[in-house]
Amino acid sequence: MKAQAAATEQREVMDIRQAADYLGISPDTLYKYASEGFVPAFKLGNRWRFKRSRLNDWMDQQSSGGNMPVRVTGKAAEEKPSRAKAKPVQSVRPARRKSAAQ
């Protein structure tokens, strides 16, 4: 039983469940990442497969800050973010009416 578990852990090509365990994330999250091309993966038939060595290289790249920043396009890219603090909102109450007795 232990030999079978050790052999499974040492496989170069893993299915989605094995790769998710290896990365410490859920299989659903890994499936989403693979579909979006965020993690290195390939399809064998209609099933996702992951090479351990490619995942290791990808993790090294991610941990060393080699990941690409999110690209902003359009008008938002041209505008510089404002550092001014938002002004507090003042409540607007109707003025109290003075009574005729006053």
Image (spheres, rainbow, N blue to C red):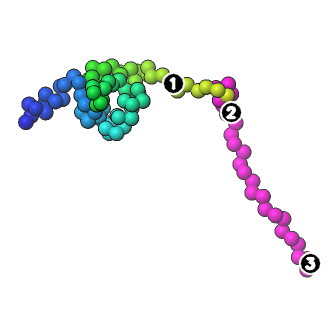
Residue type at tag 2 = Ser
Residue 67 on the magenta span = no
Q: Nearer the viewer, mark 1 or mark 2?
A: 1
Marks 2 and 3, how far apart at CA? 50 Å
Q: Nearer the viewer, residue 75 or 87?
A: 75
Q: Nearer the viewer, residue 66 or 87?
A: 66
The structure residue drawn at horizontal position 65% and vertical position 29%, both measured from the top left corner, is: 76
Which mark is first along the chain, 3 or 2? 2
The structure residue drawn at horizontal position 88% and vertical position 76%, both measured from the top left corner, is: 99
- Give coordinates of residue 101: x percent, y percent: 91, 80
Quadrant of the snapshot with the N terminus: top left
Do the CB atoms of the residues marked 2 and 3 lie less than 8 Å apart?
no
Badge 1 crowding class, 10 Å Cα cut-off, few under 14, some 14 to 19, many 20 or more, is few
Magenta segment's dominant SS is: loop
Marks 1 and 2, how far apart at CA? 20 Å
Which mark is first along the chain, 3 or 1? 1
Residue behind mark 2: 82
Relative placement, left or right, of 73 versus 44 is right
Which mark is first along the chain, 2 or 1? 1
Badge 2 crowding class, 10 Å Cα cut-off, few under 14, some 14 to 19, many 20 or more, is few
- Give coordinates of residue 34: x percent, y percent: 37, 30
Residue behind mark 3: 100
Is 40 situated above or below 24? above
Residue 19 is at least partly visible in this image: no
Which label is found at residue 69? 1
Marks 1 and 3, how far apart at CA? 67 Å
Q: Nearer the viewer, mark 1 or mark 3?
A: 1
Residue 33 is at least partly visible in this image: yes
- Give coordinates of residue 77: x percent, y percent: 64, 26
> Image quadrant of residue 15?
top left
Which label is found at residue 35? none
Residue type at tag 1 = Pro
